[in-house]
Amino acid sequence: GWYGRLEMSALAGKRKGLFGGVVGADAGFEYWTSSDGSGGGIPMAVTLGALGPLTHFGLDLGFEFLVDDRNDDTGFGIYSPFARGKLGFDFGPVMILAESQIQYRWQWGAEDYTDYRLGVSIKLLGEPELPARVVEEGPERPFY
């Protein structure tokens, strides 16, 4: 089978020398299909990671709202927890990452199961244009 995910990530990070850290949040939409079913969901996660020279490592922890249809057994789940590891290359405006995910898909109307995934993701990165910061002049106050 295969899966696809369209997601938006908000990341904040800083390098000190060659290395740095990154924190952020992800939200998206995904769809999967296989010979015995299909499904989709809305995953949301927080991410912690590290940056190196041309490299990125991240660990996501999150949950997903999902609908699954496996073996003609349809179920709906909320707060389905997952963990995802990412490792790859950071070329500035583009990241190419290998991903591994494990998720416990508990749901109403169908059997609960554990899902394992391996995949590749391509992230297109952009930085927002922030307005110039205006500093107002005020009266001087002595410090005591």
Image: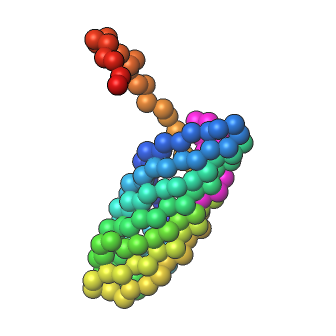
Q: Which x, y percent locates residue 18?
A: 71, 39
Residue 144 vertical placement versus 70 (above, below): above
Magenta stretch, residue numbers: 86-95
Q: Which x, y percent locates residue 59?
A: 55, 61
**Point 31% across, 17% down: residue:** 141
On whether residue 90 falls in the magenta region, the answer is yes
Residue 92 vertical placement versus 26 (above, below): above
Q: Is residue 97 at all visible to an observer of this figure?
A: no
Is most of the magenta stretch helix, strand or loop? strand
Task: For the C terminus, give its image quadrant.
Answer: top left
Q: Is residue 128 at all visible to an observer of this figure?
A: yes
The residue sitting at the bottom extreme is 111
Q: Which x, y percent locates residue 36?
A: 46, 81
Q: Quadrant of residue 110?
A: bottom left
**Point 35% across, 61% down: residue:** 42
Colour basis: rainbow
Q: Nearer the viewer, residue 110 or 114?
A: 114
The residue sitting at the front extreme is 144
Question: Would residue 90 appear left or right of 137 to someone viewing this image?
Answer: right
Q: Nearer the viewer, residue 35 or 78?
A: 78
Residue 17 vertical placement versus 46 (above, below): above
On whether residue 57 falls in the magenta region, the answer is no
Q: Which x, y percent locates residue 103?
A: 47, 74
Q: Nearer the viewer, residue 103 or 19?
A: 19
